[in-house]
Image (cartoon, rainbow, N blue to C red):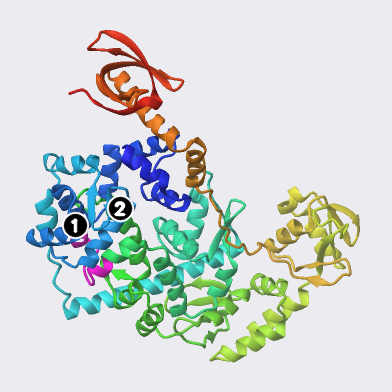
Amino acid sequence: MLTLASRLRALNDAALRRTIALRSVNPHGIHDFFDLAEALLDPAAIQVTLSHLDRSTLAVLAVASDLGAPSLDELVERLADLGHDTQDAADICARVTHLDELMLLTRTDDSVRPYPAVTARLRAWPEEGLPGTADLAGVPAPTALAPLSATDGRFTERLAAERAFAAVSSIAELLTELGQEPARELSRGGLGLPDTKRLAMAMRVDIDAVAPLVGIAARAELVALGAGYWSQSAAGVDWLVMSASERWGVLAASWLGVLPADVRQILAQRPGVAWGDAMHRFVAWLYPAGGTWMDERIAAFARDAELIGITARQTTSAAGASVLVGDIDAAIATITASLPAEVGTVYLQHDLSIVAPGPLSASIDARLRTFADVESRELASSYRLSGASVNRALAAGDDAESILQFLSAISLTGVPQPVDYLIRDAADRYGRVRVGSVDPADPAGPSYVSSDDSAVLGAIAVDQTFTALAFESVSDTRLTSAHPADAVFWALTDARYPVAAENAAGEVVHPRRHPVVRPTRTELPDPTIALVEELRATDGGEAKAANAWLARQLDSAIKHRETVLVSVRMPDGDVVDYLLEPASVGGGRFRARDRRADIERTLPLSSVVSIVPAP
């Protein structure tokens, strides 16, 4: 322990923080370098670290433990004798360097020496049902599954494309719905049941699929959490006007971006292998000290991979293979060939319905949604016009001519007269009711509702829907409310009144119901910084460190009532050995019973040369 404590003390702050992070040291109870060394050499802590090492690295450590202090050449030679498939010296050197960073061994010049506590832990493995050195080095990886047949491969690709299209479509509906009404995040995490049901209906998915799809959208930063609500983000607004394959590319890139390097390495080692039993067998072989943690990591990403079509039936698709090697452009090109072709025209019907003969391009779909409601969302979508839907577009700043011009450009059947009449009539009626703030300098203050149409204003005044707004009539053309203008405006909009918001100059303005939220990243404090600062503060130099180590040994002997052999340097320079039973330590001195002379001695710690267990 003294050797490791001295080594830790000699590290610079950056290297020390890295060591603490690599070993996931809990700072609780760590006050000096001896505490840190003790924590690193604790058998349970060593076992946790070993469980995260792959088989080849464990083989290197086990062979080094068996040989004691071998050179790198001796390590390579012994591994080859045991049948290990990695005999490259550079690879062995890299693994030794990693073990050295983990403080499982110390490397000096060309030799390596595992710490005794590590060696003891490895030697106990066979009794615990874990592999010994020969098994670690010599047992080959399980045989991979045979490649898929041509028929199975085509089925996998078709299924992956269907899932990719479904995921993109569902997340598009999610963003659209959240743009209209955010979803509340519960204090304990997750969406509430009412919002989950609402989103499931809008997305046309099972209720259990909502949370994973929201998670995928959040990872891609298409939605963001703000003030306790999930809302559409600025990136989500841009995403909605991309093509289907580009949308999928964003989802795939975000999946890859947070895929841990170790998981990606495993997948690269087993290309084309199903992520099911075969992968579990490989993980169990690769992490013989306990691969459950890796299984859990793979399972989390495998679920999302299935949802967005990177895999199908737990087998990597062609597009998914490109994603795994980091070539998103190639993956997009592959998935584009598999997705149904987008169309740019619709059938405009006399019954005010709009039917698309195939999946619409994203830009046309987004534009239609501003003034029409989605009725069905399949390969062939349908929309419906209404006075309320057109009024929604007008409130957002659109006008009748631009809507009719757009419909004329995309309609295969022209613009039927009922459609033309509905849009122009809605535009004529829009703005008959105006809402604004009584005091323009205080938008959160009282508001007014005005209209030259006394019949419409009278209907609003007696409408039981607005009881909470407590309207008061101040004239035949004006009502007031204690509630702010935006609350009144959206209440009237939801009730389908031809309402417009206006500013102090009487000009129509177009408020956004829910502001676009930008994802925020909370920077958590690095706990290793505080721990390193404490370690440096308690370190008082070589002399103090040596005395602290001696005191630690004496405390251990006192705790366990052990007799130790203490070598003490006398004033004349001679070293005298005493067989002592320590009783107390303090003030730079310690008191002990001399077992040979049967007397009590008090000795200064500064004179102690060494302390070893009694023979």
Task: List x then y, in percent, for residue 200.
Answer: 46, 60
Mark found first going from the N terminus, 2 or 1: 1
Measured Cα–Cα span from mark 2 to mark 1: 14 Å
Question: In the rendered image of this protein, does residue 350 appear above or below residue 37?
Answer: below
| Element under disc 2 | helix
Nearest to the observer: residue 555 or residue 364: 555
The answer to whether residue 302 of the structure is visible from this angle is: no
For the residue marked with disc 1, what is the amino acid?
Ser
Q: Taking 296 as reference, is 427 left or right?
A: right
Badge 1 crowding class, 10 Å Cα cut-off, few under 14, some 14 to 19, many 20 or more, is: some
- The residue under label 2 is 100
Task: List x then y, in percent, for residue 192.
Answer: 51, 49
Q: Which mark is residue 71?
A: 1
Task: List x then y, in percent, for residue 484.
Answer: 79, 54
Residue 424: quadrant of the picture: bottom right
| Residue 277 among magenta residues | yes
The residue furthest right is 475
| Nearer mark to the viewer, of 2 and 1 | 1
Q: Quadrant of the C terminus?
A: top left
Badge 2 crowding class, 10 Å Cα cut-off, few under 14, some 14 to 19, many 20 or more, is: some
For the residue marked with disc 2, what is the amino acid?
Asp
Q: Residue at x 39, y 35 (%)?
A: 35
Q: Quadrant of the N terminus?
A: top left
Question: In the rendered image of this protein, does residue 371 appear above or below residue 212?
Answer: below
Q: Taking 120 as reference, is 12 left or right?
A: right
Magenta stretch: give its range.
267-279
Task: List x then y, in percent, for residue 26.
Answer: 41, 40
Q: Residue at x 33, y 74 (%)?
A: 325
